[in-house]
Image (spheres, rainbow, N blue to C red):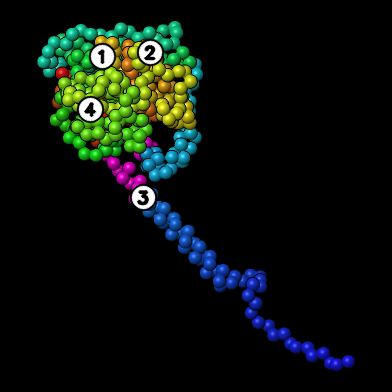
Amino acid sequence: MPEVKRERIQAGPPASGTAARPGRTPRLAVRRHKRALLALLGVFLVVIGYVGATLTPYLTAPGTDPINARVAEWGRDHHLSWAVSWLENQTYKPPPVGGALDPSQLARLRGPGGPAPNPTVAPSRSAVPLDLPAAIAPLASPPLPGEGQWHPLVLGPSGVPLVEGTALRPDAQHTSELAYVAWMNQKALTFALHPGYQQPGGSWQTPDQIPPGARTGLVATWNGGFKINPDDSLGGYYAEGRTVRPLVAGKAAEVFYRDGSIRIGQWGRDATMGPDVAAVRENLSPLVDGGRVMVGPGAGSSGLWGYTISNAYFVARSGVGMTANGDIVYVGGGALSVYTLAQLLKQAGAVYAMELDINPSWVSFMTYGGSSPANPTPSRLWDFAQSAARYYQPSSRDFVAVYRR
């Protein structure tokens, strides 16, 4: 047989695609690993830089908005609504059903919780008729001492109340909660709409705060409505001859006139544009119209009445209405549904009423008194999240200021 030649196989580097020896990492794999880490680091730095650049203006903006509200606003304005909603839902606690008021709440029923207003004020240009509201019939029974009974918050000439306040349980189920109501004598007061530097934004002659030198005669302020940009309010905003967003016929509106009066009603029916109109602030649809509550008990979190934390019905809400004789009532509280808000506004005497803002960071009502007429001391109607000095600093959102005539 022919001899078979056997060749010696020389040891050498493994062919491409073959496994490396155990315990040794190929240089190519190391380079790929480094490139991946550098890419991840680059993405991380870009994200951190973007967050820092876009979040910082929200955190450093003027005003008294809480930090959590500023971060939430940044998130919703930068395509992170899903994350904000998830965090809010995780921390939300619904109000308890049943239970009783604690001693501090019972004390609020007996009288105002803030500093006593100063009755020594500049005389009015005209006598103010005595025009006091009737007590509010409580929605829970049996009535508690002081529930729904009015107490003076701001006094005018001769001690006539210009602003009065009361508290009552918001419904028959949430009996360990309180809702708060303020009544304002329109004949003795003037009303003005102030813009916020974010909502509606832009440049205005009217300031986004009540600055020093413009506080004489100030008696009350209250919060605005849903955002104008984007169109959460489903309505328009007009002031100083400018339209930020077109007014919508049929929507609920605060209408401010050049003589300082205000009307609450349906735009296009109860009020229309004319030379006497100074400003209009629309927000959603009427809650009370012609003395009838326009929402049902099942109305809750929705695009119409506002998406709330955890889609809950009972959250912090506010609303404003007008009585049959033209006086103004404001309702706010920490555990209200849109239905209970409407019921409370009607109980307070409103024949026309609208929802304003919702959720804890945005609801507020202040009265002003003390010993300095030129720089009155603000007092909160109840213990909401915002500072009493909210409108003594630039405000991110629009608001209403009320002055003595």
Magenta stretch containing residue 37, yes or no?
Answer: no
Q: Which residues are magenta?
A: 52-71
Q: Nearer the viewer, residue 156 or 323?
A: 323
User: Would you name the residue on which mark 2 appears?
Assistant: 292
Q: Nearer the viewer, residue 311 or 384?
A: 311
The label on residue 290 is none
- Whether label 2 touches label 1, CB < 8 Å: no
Res 159 quadrant in image: top left
Nearer to us: label 1 or label 3: 1
Q: Secondary structure at mark 3?
A: helix
Query: Which quadrant holds the C terminus?
Result: top left
User: Residue 156, relative to residue 306: is it above or below?
Assistant: above
Q: Is residue 151 left or right of residue 168?
A: left
User: Would you name the residue on which mark 1 appears?
Assistant: 327
The label on residue 279 is 4
Type of residue at label 2? Arg
Q: Nearer the viewer, residue 114 or 34?
A: 34
Res 13 quadrant in image: bottom right
Residue in view at x 45 percent, y 8 percent: 141
Q: CA distance from mark 4 to mark 3?
A: 37 Å
- Whether label 1 touches label 3, CB < 8 Å: no
Residue in view at x 32 percent, y 42 percent: 58
Q: Does residue 330 appear in this view?
A: no
Q: Main secondary structure of the magenta part?
A: helix
Q: Is residue 106 left or right of residue 367?
A: right
Q: CA distance from mark 2 to mark 1?
A: 18 Å
Type of residue at label 4? Ala
- Whether label 4 touches label 3, CB < 8 Å: no
User: Residue 234, relative to residue 289: is it above or below?
Assistant: below
Q: CA distance from mark 2 to mark 3?
A: 49 Å
User: Would you name the residue on which mark 3 appears?
Assistant: 52
Q: Earlier in the sequence, mark 2 or mark 3?
A: 3
